[in-house]
């Protein structure tokens, strides 16, 4: 794969939306797996018991913006009754350490008393979103960041195509996608009723799908699969299925999640970086930017084991090309920022910056990644200073 040249005729984009360009994403899924077992990654990672230490560690590593989750299934264990005891400690700990938070309202999980297929799901989620906005307002927030539903496209596939997690259905991915888009729109409206200046990060995987050969059929199928990644954002913006009520006002900030396995052939085989069909990240970011003209956040990225620091280095090479070409990328978030036990043997478990806690509640820092992160932060600061002189 040849390196993509920077366009000298474009002005470099200067990120300014978030408190810090480099960010940390906490694993906060509360999905139920196909066997019916709920997997709460906030608990499994020890994050719920180590909020103060974890947020303090972010500050130590100059990560002043983060993504974390309000666990709906804990907050609303009985219909319409909200217990915020699992959330307000997170809110206050983030406040104490000066962390700007992007709060996720539904990360693959929801209360057991809710039927995700029914219209009542949309109403329940909107009420929950409004109640959370009221809590934030009463705490003195006027412009918080939210992700209403994390990764609509991935959840639709994992939960309703392959029955990998709740709602454990097969062949109903499109139905779930439509339902999750409806719920997202209702939640955004409910939050804006309380907090008109709230901002929203709409996340989904950023992928590339390539044909295995040069046949017209293969090329057409690859194009179809590749474009499918935009469906949820197109629905939210009103481009697709306008009967859902989508509009560009719902497509605020686009969060893209990108990992080493986010490019593949139409048969599912991994697309190796050295293959001629592999597309550099900067071009994938440019495709989203030119399609929507909305601020972008690389909301999750990470690799396993010893690949962690080289992966961040390669990501930042591509990010800097994108920024130099005027792409409105506002941040890069390391995922997961703290380690958690894998959901299952076949589940991607990107290596974290901070390990699982020991019996004393201390996490080991993965030094190669920490050093690479600091190096990239310094480079970004130097470029920013050069451009402002």
Image: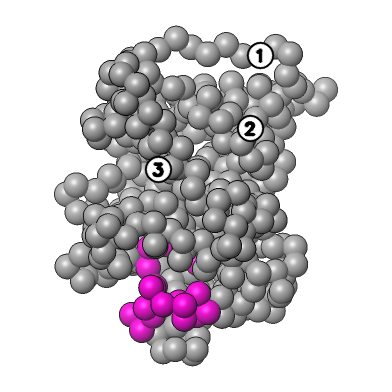
Residue 175: image x %, image y %? 39, 62
**In this image, 236 relative to 39: left or right?**
right
The residue beneath circle 1 is: 7
Q: Are marks 1 and 3 in contact (CB under 8 Å)?
A: no
Question: Residue at label 2?
Answer: 290
**Is residue 208 in view?**
no
Helix or strand or loop: what does disc 2 sit on? helix
Residue 27: which quarter of the image? bottom left
Is-magenta flag for residue 268? no
Q: Is residue 105 magenta?
A: yes
Residue denoted by label 3: 353
For the residues labelled 2 and 1, the Cα–Cα distance comes to 15 Å
Spatial separation of the CA atoms under disc 1 and disc 3: 33 Å
Mark whose residue sits in front, 1 or 3 = 1
Q: Pick whichever, 20 or 137, lies toward us.
A: 137
Left/right of residue 324 with respect to residue 364 in the rendered view: right
Q: Residue at x 64, y 73 (%)?
A: 190
Task: State the scheme by which the image is colored.
Answer: one colour
Q: Quadrant of residue 385?
A: top right
**Residue at 24% in and 32% down:** 267
Horizontal and vertical percent position of residue 307: 32, 29
- Quick one: SS at disc 3? loop
* Nearest to the observer: residue 237 or residue 12: 237
Residue drawn at point x = 58 percent, y = 70 percent = 187
Highlighted magenta segment, given as a residue range: 96-125
Residue 273 sits above or below residue 195 on the image: above
Judged from this view, the residue extending furthest toward the right is: 389
């Amino acid at each position: 794969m040849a390196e993509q040249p920077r366009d000298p005729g474009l002005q470099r984009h200067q990120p300014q939306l978030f408190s810090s360009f480099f960010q940390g994403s906490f694993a906060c899924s509360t999905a139920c797996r196909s066997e019916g077992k709920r997997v709460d990654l906030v608990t499994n990672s020890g994050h719920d018991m180590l909020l103060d230490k974890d947020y303090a560690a972010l500050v130590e590593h100059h990560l002043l913006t983060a993504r974390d989750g309000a666990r709906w299934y804990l907050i609303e264990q009985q219909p319409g009754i909200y217990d915020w005891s699992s959330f307000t400690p997170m809110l206050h700990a983030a406040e104490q350490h000066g962390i700007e938070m992007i709060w996720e309202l539904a990360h693959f999980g929801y209360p057991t008393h809710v039927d995700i297929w029914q219209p009542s799901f949309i109403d329940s989620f909107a009420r929950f979103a409004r109640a959370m906005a009221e809590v934030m307002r009463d705490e003195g927030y006027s412009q918080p960041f939210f992700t209403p539903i994390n990764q609509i496209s991935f959840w639709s596939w994992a939960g309703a195509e392959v029955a990998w997690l709740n709602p454990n259905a097969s062949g109903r991915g499109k139905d779930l996608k439509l339902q999750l888009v409806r719920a997202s729109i209702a939640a955004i409206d409910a939050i804006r009723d309380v907090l008109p200046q709230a901002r929203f990060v709409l996340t989904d995987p950023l992928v590339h799908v390539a044909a295995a050969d040069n046949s017209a059929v293969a090329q057409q199928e690859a194009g179809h699969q590749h474009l499918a990644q935009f469906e949820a954002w197109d629905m939210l913006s009103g481009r697709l299925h306008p009967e859902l009520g989508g509009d560009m006002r719902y497509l605020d900030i686009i969060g893209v999640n990108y990992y080493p396995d986010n490019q593949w052939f139409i048969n599912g085989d991994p697309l190796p970086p050295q293959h001629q069909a592999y597309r550099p990240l900067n071009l994938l970011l440019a495709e989203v930017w030119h399609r929507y003209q909305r601020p972008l956040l690389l909301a999750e990225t990470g690799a396993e084991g010893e690949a962690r620091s080289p992966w961040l280095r390669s990501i930042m090479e591509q990010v800097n090309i994108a920024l130099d070409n005027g792409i409105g990328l506002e941040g890069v978030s390391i995922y997961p920022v703290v380690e958690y036990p894998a959901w299952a043997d076949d589940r991607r478990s990107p290596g974290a910056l901070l390990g699982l806690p020991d019996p004393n509640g201390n996490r080991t820092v993965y030094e190669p990644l920490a050093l690479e992160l600091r190096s990239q932060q310094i480079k970004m600061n130097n470029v920013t200073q050069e451009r402002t002189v």
